[in-house]
Image (tube, rainbow, N blue to C red):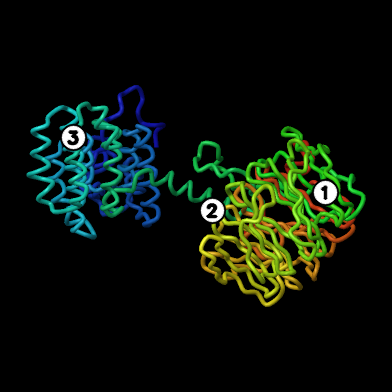
């Protein structure tokens, strides 16, 4: 094939529906359907090189080969390389689209609406659903009506509405909307109200894309079909990449189509970046703030330490120490705007501390009764209320000053979560279940039932999935909407200690959990086997928190008295990175 085939000539405005009738005689005769005929029945001839070329063309292409050629032709046509397309179709003996479809396309793009309507009668015989002709005709007449209105031809537009659109008896609700556009005083007003680009190539191209959906691909290819297939291929490779942890770019501009998508484990937060040793006893909990700029860690040493995350180096440095939690700190919850932090203690703690993180001042120290056990807490999305409770049967809703707003009697709470609706509170209890409680109408319902105690749970950002740490069983993923167990993750050692797992990664595609075997385990959400086991801690890892803004940053808290900060591998030179292209698919 010649390079582009265009030379210095202007590209032809439309594709030839006969695929290059005017090209060289070596192509042989061309039928109107774009297929080549042969005078010598495909037998080789020794008379001239042109005969050899002709013979090669007679080789029958498979259906997939024809499809690929059509896809390439469509893509080249979109680039304006029309003579190249004609040559490709001529040489291959294929047809880009049915001649009737080409004629229809031309008439639509030129705004010749009567001719386009006439073309529909010819296309009707080629369609799987002839009834779709009414819908196609409606779309054509709608464009015709809007173009008349934009041109100020109100009487002609009214005629289209009354004499052509209304008799179709299709989508009368839309016809009422269209009639309202007659009142538009200016073309800009019309385009704004109709959410329409206006008369011209843009709106007609969009119209063609809609019309094509009613035609079989053998007649007219779906718009930009090759780009769609390539984008799907790239997305599938990313989905199967175990370590993909960056923003999904739906376009193809930043992707090489010449190699498969690869993410290395070295790019994943599997490597110790920092060991924070400021606590002087077991660290029971850690949690990044919602904006990802801070980390809070709570310890048996009675303190909470607030750490600042450097936005450039991702290093953490100590910002504040909040003291005085006599029983130790086993649970922490940031307010939605990160202004406040609530700290809870272990089972025998009846107090709850609400700190102003910015000032370091204690706003509220709440205790309803010395008999209480306030071990878990969750913020209402409005940031003005929170719920708290424990295993001795307390379940309270309070304001920021610790005033009791509501209470639920007899619920032995293990862990809490407020859903985004602002009404429903999820609570795991001592009956191995998670129930939903509505404090407004005082109703409750069962959502999750396990066979073993639920030690802790967390909920995904969209509120659909719940991640449970189940005693002696490990980490379970539940669908809260369908109320079904989705997956059991393998590898982690979970007894009767409270271990907190988390969702993480750019799109919450990953799950991380601590373990009693001193490791941090990471899974891809769709894979039961761990994709990484992180070592370094020397005692039980109680909690893991993944930074919600920086997907390459994670922290873990352990009974060894340290908080470990995990990130990608240190900088590697080009020679080292050449050997780091392994990427295991979900299927392997």
Residue beneath the point at 35% across and 33% down: 81
Residue beneath the point at 74% across and 43% down: 363
Q: Say which residue label 3 marks.
A: 111
Looking at the rendered structure, the secondary structure element under dot 1 is strand
Looking at the rendered structure, the secondary structure element under dot 3 is loop
Q: Say which residue label 1 marks.
A: 564
Classify 10 Å Cα crowding around label 2: few (below 14), some (14-19), many (20 and above).
Answer: few
The quadrant where residue 28 appears: top left
Q: Is residue 269 visible?
A: no
56, above or below 478, in the image: above
Q: Is residue 289 left or right of residue 203?
A: right
Query: Which mark is first along the chain, 2 or 1?
Result: 2
Q: Foreground mark, 3 or 1?
A: 1
Q: Which mark is residue 236?
A: 2
Q: Which mark is residue 104?
A: none
Farthest bottom residue?
451
The quadrant where residue 395 appears: bottom right
Residue beneath the point at 24% across and 60% down: 128
3D distance between C-alphas at marks 1 and 2? 33 Å
Q: Is residue 123 visible?
A: yes
Indicate the position of residue 432 as horizontal and vertical percent values.
68, 74
């Amino acid at each position: 094939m010649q390079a582009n085939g265009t030379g210095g000539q202007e590209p032809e405005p439309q594709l030839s529906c006969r695929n290059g009738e005017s090209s060289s005689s070596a192509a042989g005769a061309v039928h109107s359907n774009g297929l080549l005929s042969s005078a010598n029945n495909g037998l080789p001839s020794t008379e001239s090189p042109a005969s050899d070329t002709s013979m090669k063309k007679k080789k029958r292409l498979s259906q997939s080969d024809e499809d690929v050629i059509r896809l390439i032709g469509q893509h080249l046509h979109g680039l304006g390389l029309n003579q190249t397309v004609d040559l490709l179709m001529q040489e291959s003996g294929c047809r880009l689209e049915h001649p009737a479809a080409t004629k229809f396309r031309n008439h639509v793009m030129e705004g010749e609406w009567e001719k386009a309507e006439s073309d529909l009668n010819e296309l009707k015989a080629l369609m799987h659903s002839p009834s779709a002709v009414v819908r196609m005709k409606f779309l054509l007449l709608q464009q015709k009506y809007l173009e008349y209105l934009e041109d100020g031809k109100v009487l002609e537009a009214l005629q289209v509405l009354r004499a052509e659109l209304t008799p179709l008896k299709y989508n009368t609700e839309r016809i009422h909307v269209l009639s309202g556009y007659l009142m538009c005083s200016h073309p800009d007003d019309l385009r704004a109200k109709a959410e329409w680009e206006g008369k011209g190539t843009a709106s007609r191209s969009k119209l063609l894309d809609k019309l094509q959906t009613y035609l079989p691909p053998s007649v007219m290819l779906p718009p930009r079909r090759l780009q769609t297939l390539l984008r799907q291929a790239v997305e599938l490779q990313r989905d199967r990449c175990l370590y993909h942890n960056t923003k999904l770019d739906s376009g193809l501009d930043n992707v090489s189509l010449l190699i498969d998508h690869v993410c290395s484990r070295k790019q994943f937060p599997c490597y110790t970046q920092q060991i924070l040793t400021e606590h002087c006893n077991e660290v029971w909990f850690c949690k990044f703030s919602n904006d990802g700029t801070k980390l809070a860690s709570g310890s048996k040493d009675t303190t909470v330490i607030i750490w600042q995350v450097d936005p450039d180096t991702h290093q953490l440095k100590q910002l504040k120490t909040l003291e005085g939690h006599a029983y130790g700190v086993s649970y922490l919850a940031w307010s939605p705007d990160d202004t406040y932090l609530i700290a809870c203690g272990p089972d025998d703690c009846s107090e709850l501390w609400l700190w102003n993180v910015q000032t370091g001042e204690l706003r509220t120290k709440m205790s309803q009764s010395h008999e209480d056990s306030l071990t878990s807490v969750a913020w209402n999305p409005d940031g003005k209320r929170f719920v708290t409770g424990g295993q001795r049967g307390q379940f309270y809703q309070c304001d920021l000053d610790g005033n009791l707003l509501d209470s639920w009697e007899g619920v032995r709470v293990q862990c809490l979560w407020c859903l985004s609706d602002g009404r429903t509170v999820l609570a795991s209890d001592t009956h191995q279940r998670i129930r939903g409680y509505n404090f407004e109408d005082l109703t409750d319902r069962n959502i999750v039932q396990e066979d073993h105690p639920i030690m802790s749970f967390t909920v995904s950002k969209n509120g659909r999935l719940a991640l449970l740490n189940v005693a002696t069983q490990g980490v379970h993923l539940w669908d809260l909407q369908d109320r079904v167990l989705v997956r059991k993750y393998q590898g982690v050692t979970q007894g009767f200690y409270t271990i907190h797992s988390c969702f993480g990664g750019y799109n919450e595609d990953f799950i991380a959990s601590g373990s009693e075997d001193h490791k941090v385990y990471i899974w891809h959400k769709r894979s039961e086997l761990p994709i990484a086991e992180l070592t370094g801690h020397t005692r039980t890892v109680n909690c893991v928190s993944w930074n919600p803004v920086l997907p390459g940053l994670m922290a873990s808290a352990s009974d060894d008295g340290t908080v470990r900060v995990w990130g990608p591998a240190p900088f590697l030179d080009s020679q080292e990175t050449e050997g780091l292209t392994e990427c295991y698919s979900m299927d392997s």
